[in-house]
Image (tube, helix red, strand yellow):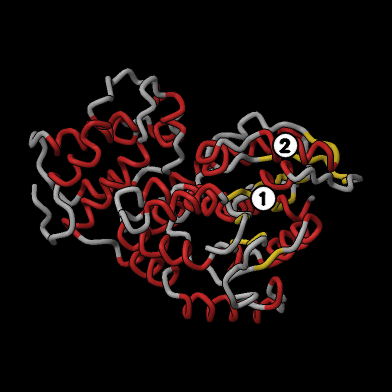
Amino acid sequence: MAGGRGATGMGDVAARIGELVRKCDRCGACLAVCPLYAQNGREIASPRGKIAVVRGLMDDGLAAVPALAETFRFCLLCRACTGSCPNKIPVAEIMIEARRYAAGQWGHPARHRVIAALLGNDVLLGLMAGVLRWTRNAKPPAGGPSASGAPASRGQIAYFQGCAMRLFFPAASRATVQLLKRTGGVVVPPGVCCGSPHLAYGMVDQALALARKNIERFAGADLVVTDCASCGSSLKEYGSRLAGDPRWADRALAFGRKVTGLSEYLFRAGYRPRGGLAAKVTYHDPCHLARGQGIRNEPRDLLRLAGDYVELPSAGRCCGGAGAFHLDYPAAAGGILRDKTADITRTGAAMVVTECPACLMQLGRGRRREHGEFEVRHISQVL
């Protein structure tokens, strides 16, 4: 099973996650919460089925064929399965390693290589952000794509502006900066991609290289606030991902401890919305915020203070966006999205709020496709 491209063989994978894989006792608790299994009912789509495939490869009972790469990619990495698992098996981490292995054997899809190259390049990302701003005549937050243009200094709150917020939701980014200014001084250092997309593609080495850059650039900040759930989860995990690197382990751990999500920060800082929001509002939990960081109550408490809040019954269920999953598997993502859109409509809310750009894009697609009579907004734009 050794890696055909010299990157990662199954022996390497077994060394990293073999113990986790063998914790699965095939109880099936994950089947009840997996959005993809709910869509097609196929065992191979379930967390249990995917773990069985990895175990088969590790035990040399299953041939390594290119079709397995699709099996590993057909996962939202939503972590719902881990929450329901009696053994709390981190299936998302197992899938990241499995994708890393598959890429070593058969390479990455061209679309993944293009996206990763764009997000991993400061210059290209800046150019794309500039073009998008020009097309919609939008002003960049705090003065430009790289904002302050300098690393954060001691005593400052640093805003980590994720790639998707920078490219697609500059108005929400500006709202975030204004909120942070109400609670203290804020700077916007020139960070790089958090590495979350690269991890999702199994490009672990590239993700770690980006992590080291961000640790350097935000070294002086006392607090790092982000309004992207995926970025927040990724940044907070730098410590565990770089734990085996003696040069970076301590710095990565310290960095992760000073990262906070926007609603998490505002709630702890005692921020109180001005209130008076006329529209009935509901909230969708981003997977990387609720399950990735355990942040569920803070955004809801803030929204209740802002106006008329109604709970979304399926708030914690993945919307199907999952980064670029909706591009790779539009039919599966679309089925999940239809259910989510119907649930939002049933609440009677005039607005659904979330704290993740990928969710914003996916929920916006759902509203347009199903002709939903609700707006989709980032939480910064409501508070």
Image location of residue 322, percent across then percent down? 48, 49
**371 left or right of 75?**
right
Q: Is residue 174 above or below residue 242?
A: below
Toward the right, the furthest residue is 276
Task: Name the amino acid, label 2.
Answer: Arg
Q: Is residue 206 above or below residue 230?
A: below
At a point 67% along the width and 50% down the height, the residue shown is: 262
Please name whichever residue, 276 or 297, is drawn nearer the observer in this view of the structure: 297
Q: Does residue 206 appear left or right of residue 343 in this picture?
A: left
Q: Which residue is mark 2?
A: 300
Q: Position of residue 62 (x, y in %)?
A: 11, 37
Against 310, residue 329 (above or below) is below
Residue at (85% x, 40% y) in the render = 307
Residue 262, numbered circle: 1
What type is the residue that disc 1 sits on?
Leu
How crowded pointer 1 is (Cα within 10 Å; few <14, some 14-19, many 20+) is rated as many
SS for callout 2: helix
